[in-house]
Amino acid sequence: MDSIARLTDQPNVSWELDGDQSQARAARAALLEQLTRPHHFVAGAHLDSPGIARVTSSGDGYALEYLAPPIG
């Protein structure tokens, strides 16, 4: 997914591929909220390098706080 920034900045966004868009938005919102809790991290190939971050609340959305400076 190349839209991790969109998911954190605009957590209510949905895609055509979401079979049930309201259910998909609710599931993503619940997951992002859970990930703001201590000791929760996200990791993946579609995150900026180094690919491991914390999710933090930011205004009406969320932000990624990377655990290490970018590689390269």
Image: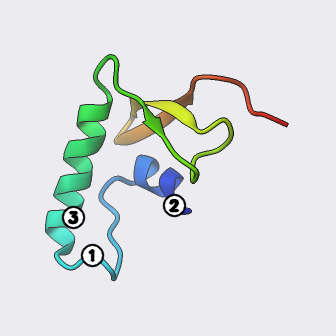
Give the percent coordinates (x, y) of residue 26. 17, 56
Question: Which label belongs to residue 24?
Answer: 3
Q: Residue furthest top?
A: 38
Q: Are marks 3 and 2 in contact (CB under 8 Å)?
A: no
Tag 2 residue = 3
Q: CA distance from mark 1 to mark 2?
A: 14 Å
Q: CA distance from mark 1 to mark 3?
A: 6 Å
Q: Residue at x 74, y 33 (%)?
A: 70
Q: Residue at x 64, y 44 (%)?
A: 48
**Scheme by which the image is coloured:** rainbow
Residues packed near mark 2 inside 10 Å, few (<14), some (14 to 19) or many (20 plus): few
Q: Are marks 1 and 3 in contact (CB under 8 Å)?
A: yes
Could you tell me which secondary element the residue under label 1 belongs to?
A: loop
Give the percent coordinates (x, y) of residue 50. 66, 35
Could you tell me which secondary element the residue under label 2 belongs to?
A: loop
Question: Which label belongs to residue 18?
Answer: 1
